[in-house]
Image (cartoon, helix red, strand yellow):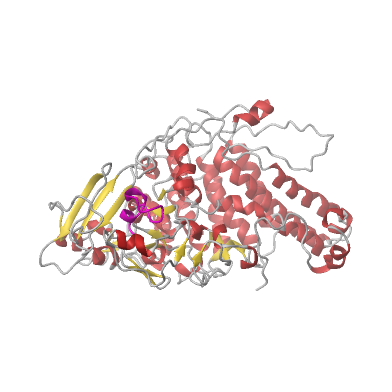
Amino acid sequence: MKKIITILGVFTGLLVLGSCKKVLDAEPLSLISPDVVWSSKANAETFIYGTYGIMNAYNGGTKGAQDIYTANIIGAYGNASDALPVFTETLTNRSDYGFNNWADIRRCNVIIKNVTESAGIAEADKKALIAEAKFLRAMSYYSIARRTGRIVWIDKVLTENDDLKLPSTANPTESYNYIIKDLEDAVADLPTTKITGRTNKYVAAAFLTEVCLQALAYKNYPAAPNVAPGDPLLDKIITNAQLVISGGYALEADYEGMFNETKSTSNEIIFAIYRKAINTSLSDTPMQHQLPNIKPETITQFGGSPLFNKPVPFEVWPENFPTQNFTDDYLTIDKADPTRALPWNQTSQYLNAVDEGVDVIAPFVKSGFPDDKTAKLNNDVVVKMGRIKPGSTETMLTLTNENRDARWKASIISDNSTFYGELFRTSLKGNSGRFLGTINGGGYETSLSNMYWRKGLYTNVAPSYLNSVNTDYHWVCMRLGRIYLNLAEAYLLKGDLTNALLNLNKTRTFHGKLPASTAGTTAAAWKDYKTERRVELAEENDRYYSLLRWGRFGGDANNGLASGQSISELTESIRVMDLSKDSKSFSIVTGPFNNQYNNRKFDISRRYLFPIAQGYIDNNAKFGPQNPGW
């Protein structure tokens, strides 16, 4: 398969590729004539390749992207600082959460203009190149629209003779109409050829399904969208999803491998951003923020064990950890009734094995802490605790690992997990749990939740997980599993329960190895769908925007509340589970966890969109009015 690797920060000029080579060898990049750049398809493509940095905004960066605003993630340090203003509602209308994408839009418009006017590019090639530029323009605008709702639509190359004080769109619907039109043009004129890291007809159709879902949710904003089963946008979602499904993609059996080096070009992946080790260090990737950094003396100081095989196998800066709120959605097959998949603490095996009436909390001490107890900090509040009953053959490890959603072990490092040749014990008196960290003077090095992300970790980083080590990396932006879920949501909005279940069960049964959902009501189907989407698309920059979308839909999509009301999943307190060293006692606590993580608010008058940074409006009144509530 041909490959075009999208490399962040490299394509600030033209690359030395193909027929450009002699020209580029002879002239400085800054002096290359536009006549040369647009003289042939190959030369034009080098400029287009350099425009794919636009997709970085969709992906969202290295630290969990906008998922950090949700209860999926508990953050530390910079990651927590970035999220706090959002979920504590302390940001102001001066906060800039994206509006100025005009440099990227200019690049797209330059492509469209110059390809159209080129005498050296064949007419048949022009259509595809222009379609590619429209796709990139649409994706740049989509990254803005789902944050601020409104954009500054520019569809030509502006000159000094133009009025540069352009207006913003009047509302999100106008924004999405422009974006949808660009994507529909891209679907019509792009080829079906699959080139890794580059768009094609199926890529454009795939993103169009999700854009249409967001567009549906923000119709009539800030009033309710009032989505009807016959809404044309629903038909667009279904038509384009079916086009993608017909494109030869297939669900990947190795779920974990899709997000590391093993299956980085899996046939399930529709579009990903790829970086090469030649100019990428571990610190440029999410891996920098997802693993511990623990010295042997820290483990020993806290009476922990075992030591890691390498003295310090992970030398990174951990800031992004999965929460108990999130991981509770990895369902477990009930041993008494294998047709049922339930939360791990609602299964028959749990109910038979655990006594929740036992007090398992003991005052924490660094050494000599009992193996059969858990502890809490002064600010922790115990939500639930219990201990395995005498005579039971179960342990907390069997209850939380056996018969569980297959994506659990592929996505999460928890107590007794092995990764990179190292055994993680995140329990009390383990080698990588939260009581070894900052909260007890042990340093910044450990998870705040007693769990780490496994999803997205490469297994071939060498010689160790040191932040300066060079490594390949890729971000999965769109894949077939996501398409099935978008399709399921469209059918739910149509009230077609049969087809909704058919499509949500695609990933649930194949990736999760769970029994199919047999939800008999729309409310039950929405519940199963939201759980499935949360688990399937973890760390793929989906959760925050999906919750906002469902809040806008209201009804069964948002726990029975009317459109535009609060979203409980964005206000619930973060939970963390502690385990005893003997794996028979547990406690679940909530608390500030050093970062006000139990101070979660959602102002329904404004939080469905971020503000347009007031500074922009101050400089150009046509960008206003400010978004409601800001």
Instruction: Tell whether position 506 is magenta.
Output: no
Is residue 58 visible to us here?
A: yes
Relative horizontal placement of residue 492, taking residue 416 as reference (left or right): right
> Does 44 appear above or below 72?
below
Rendered location of residue 126, percent (x, y): 79, 58
> Does 22 appear above or below 60?
below
The quadrant holding residue 275 is: bottom right
Rendered location of residue 528, percent (x, y): 35, 54
- Of residue 256 and residue 457, the one placed in the foreground of this image is 457
Relative horizontal placement of residue 583, taking residue 598 as reference (left or right): left
Image quadrant where one finds the N terminus: bottom right
Relative horizontal placement of residue 186, taking residue 173 as reference (left or right): right
- Of residue 55 and residue 114, the one placed in the foreground of this image is 55
- Of residue 367 and residue 142, the one placed in the foreground of this image is 367
Which region of the structure is painted magenta? 433-448
> Does 149 appear above or below 522?
above
- Of residue 260 and residue 551, the one placed in the foreground of this image is 260
Rendered location of residue 467, percent (x, y): 53, 61
Residue at horizontal 59%, vertical 46%?
A: 143
